Image (cartoon, rainbow, N blue to C red):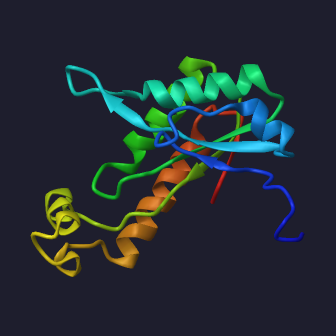
C-alpha cells in the first residue's frame, strides 16, 4: 500500500456530526468505523447518541460500505454493563454492524481530576490512572461479555 492510496476504513466520530457516506464510498472506502457514543436521558440511563444513530443509518442506507463501530469503554465503569449496553443497542436499533471494536484509549480513574488537568488547573501528570493490570482486566471482561452476547458480529480481542 502506498501512502497516496485511498483510506479503506476511515474512523468517523460524533465530532464529525455530518458525513456524506457516498463521498467516502466514491473515494474508494470499503468500510467505515463509527463511534457508538452513549448519551444520557433525563433519568440518567445510557442511550445511543442521536449523532451516532444517524451516522449508522446514513452509512447503512446511503452506501454499500461495511459498517464497523467502536465503543470507548470506560475503566471507571463496570465492563459487563457497558458490553451489555453495546449489544442491546445494536440489537434494539437493528444496526447492520459487522464489527465491534473495544476502543481502550483512556486510563484515567478520576474524571473530575482529568477535567482539571485538561483545563490546566492541575498538572495532567497528577491525574490518577489505572494500573496496566486493571486496564487489561477491564478490556478482557468487556470483550468476553461482548462475545457471550447474541451479537452476530466479530469483536476485537
The residue shown at (78%, 30%) is 22
Rendered location of residue 7, percent (x, y)? 78, 55
Residue toward you, 60 or 143: 60
The quarter of the picture where residue 47 lies is top left
**Image side of residue 126 versus residue 16, left or right:** left
The residue shown at (61%, 45%) is 147
Image quarter of the N terminus: bottom right
Rendered location of residue 149, percent (x, y)? 58, 36
Residue toward you, 138 or 13: 13
**Image side of residue 114 versus residue 30, left or right:** left
Rendered location of residue 77, percent (x, y)? 30, 50
The residue shown at (54%, 18%) is 92
**Image side of residue 68 versus residue 111, left or right:** right
Q: Is residue 88 visible?
A: no
Count of number-bearing discs: 0
Rendered location of residue 83, percent (x, y)? 47, 42
Q: Is residue 15 visible?
A: yes
Q: Is residue 152 above or below residue 118?
A: above
Image quarter of the C terminus: bottom right
The residue shown at (16%, 70%) is 120
Q: Residue furthest left?
A: 121
Amino acid at each position: 500500500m502506498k501512502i497516496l492510496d485511498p483510506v479503506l476504513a476511515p474512523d468517523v466520530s460524533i465530532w464529525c456530526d455530518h458525513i456524506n457516506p457516498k463521498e467516502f464510498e466514491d473515494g474508494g472506502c470499503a468500510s467505515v468505523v463509527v463511534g457508538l457514543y452513549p448519551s444520557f436521558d433525563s433519568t440518567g440511563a445510557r442511550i445511543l447518541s442521536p449523532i451516532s444513530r444517524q451516522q449508522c443509518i446514513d452509512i447503512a442506507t446511503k452506501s454499500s460500505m461495511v459498517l464497523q463501530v467502536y465503543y470507548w469503554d470506560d475503566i471507571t465503569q463496570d465492563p459487563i454493563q457497558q458490553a451489555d449496553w453495546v449489544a442491546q443497542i445494536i440489537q434494539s436499533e437493528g444496526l447492520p454492524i459487522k464489527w465491534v471494536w473495544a476502543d481502550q484509549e483512556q486510563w484515567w480513574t478520576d474524571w473530575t481530576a482529568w477535567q482539571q488537568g485538561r483545563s490546566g488547573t492541575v498538572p495532567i501528570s497528577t491525574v490518577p490512572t489505572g494500573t496496566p493490570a486493571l486496564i487489561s482486566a477491564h478490556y478482557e471482561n468487556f470483550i468476553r461479555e461482548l462475545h457471550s452476547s447474541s451479537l452476530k458480529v466479530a469483536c476485537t480481542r
